[in-house]
């Protein structure tokens, strides 16, 4: 095993990423075999991709937050809040589609600023801030929509063009956009001053502060990036599933966090992998579709996702202990 890990190609690609890709392929083949081949159908692949888009943007966003040593459990409810407020404004008050989409992103940005400011400048623990934001997002969405569900326009309507963000004449536009955003996130995190400071905050915030860096600004930036990606996630959610209900979204927090932690992002901060997050997201999405294809309810996915988070965190803690 050690010889394999020391191989030049393996070291360049990443042993963890290779293992994750193998796991994903084995899961796909296993689900296909257990369902008599029906899992290999185009509709199942499409559903897996549709689920991966919005979950992927959530995971990319929370990767930046976790890299600083923080956490954000509000991403799911905030995504729903973005979709509900902007969708209700469009349907009830006649806000144009373009402005509604922009509104979705801006609401996500505002929550990112709110969370980041409280964590970075007021030094409120990230766990407390994110739990508070989760409830605030649910409350705003419920009050604004009068607890009514919101259905965005269907493909056949004049305003249904926004669904082309997911698929255009069968071509997976959403996959191209998601991977392009992931590449940008990887460049920001690994090749820019912003990313280096964000990672350094997770490794040793005090050392970064003593070196003269404005740690508050860079920590807040991580939450703003997260909020922006959550706003984008809301667009892809409604483009794939159309209807949004107040009071929901919590279930996607753990799935998004599981995706990035499974991909190699350390819950202790200081270490993050965007490519690993992307692979982790597709594994979670594949798992979700596989469980449904086998006839089980979504609750089983919650159990497996929870176990995945525990296993990934334990693996990270063990690796750090061995390194130390």
Image (tube, rainbow, N blue to C red):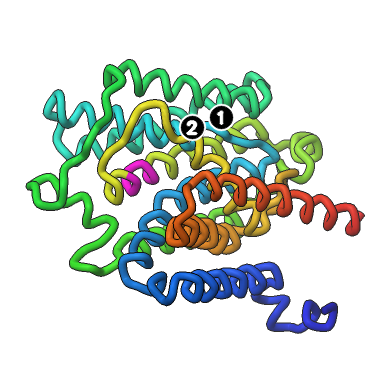
- Disc 1, disc 2: CB below 8 Å? yes
Across and down, in percent, residue 275 comes to 57, 63
Q: Residue at x 64, y 56 (%)?
A: 262
Residue under the image location 29 percent in, 44 percent down: 238
Which portion, as a residue range, is magenta?
Answer: 232-237
Is residue 233 covered in magenta?
yes
The image quarter containing residue 323 is bottom right
Q: What element does badge 1 sit on?
A: helix
**Which quadrant holds residue 103?**
top left
Q: Which quarter of the image is occupied by the C terminus?
A: bottom right
Task: Give me the disc on residue 69.
Answer: none
Residue 193 makes an appearance in the image: no
Q: Note whether residue 322 is visible.
A: yes
Residue 286 vs residue 122, the one in the foreground: 286
Horizontal and vertical percent for residue 105? 35, 38
Q: Which mark is residue 112?
A: 2
Residue 116's disc is: 1
Mark 1 crowdedness (10 Å alpha carbons): few <14, some 14-19, many ≥20: many
Q: Quadrant of the N terminus?
A: bottom right
């Amino acid at each position: 095993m050690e010889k394999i890990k020391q191989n030049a190609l393996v070291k360049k690609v990443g042993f963890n990423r290779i293992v994750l890709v193998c796991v994903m392929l084995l899961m796909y083949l296993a689900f296909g075999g257990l369902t008599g081949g029906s899992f290999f159908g185009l509709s199942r692949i499409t559903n897996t991709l549709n689920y991966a888009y919005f979950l992927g943007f959530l995971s990319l966003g929370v990767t930046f937050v976790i890299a600083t040593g923080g956490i954000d459990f509000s991403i799911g409810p905030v995504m729903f809040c973005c979709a509900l407020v902007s969708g209700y404004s469009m349907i009830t008050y006649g806000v144009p589609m373009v402005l509604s989409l922009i509104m979705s992103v801006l609401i996500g940005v505002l929550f990112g600023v709110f969370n980041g400011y409280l964590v970075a400048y007021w030094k409120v623990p990230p766990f407390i801030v994110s739990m508070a934001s989760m409830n605030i997002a649910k409350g705003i969405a419920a009050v604004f929509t009068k607890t009514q569900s919101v259905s965005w326009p269907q493909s056949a309507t004049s305003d249904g063009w926004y669904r082309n963000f997911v698929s255009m004449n069968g071509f997976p536009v959403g996959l191209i956009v998601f991977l392009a955003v992931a590449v940008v996130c990887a460049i920001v995190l690994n090749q820019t001053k912003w990313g280096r400071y964000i990672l350094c905050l997770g490794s040793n915030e005090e050392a970064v502060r003593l070196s003269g860096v404005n740690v508050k600004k860079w920590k807040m930036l991580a939450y703003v990036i997260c909020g922006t990606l959550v706003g984008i996630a809301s667009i892809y959610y409604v483009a794939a599933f159309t209807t949004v209900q107040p009071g929901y979204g919590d279930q996607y927090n753990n799935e998004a966090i599981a995706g990035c932690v499974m991909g190699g992002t350390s819950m202790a901060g200081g270490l993050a992998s965007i490519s690993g997050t992307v692979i982790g997201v597709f594994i979670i999405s594949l798992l979700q579709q596989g469980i449904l294809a086998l006839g089980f309810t979504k609750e089983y996915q919650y159990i497996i996702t929870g176990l995945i988070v525990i296993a990934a965190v334990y693996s990270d803690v063990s690796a750090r202990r061995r390194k130390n």
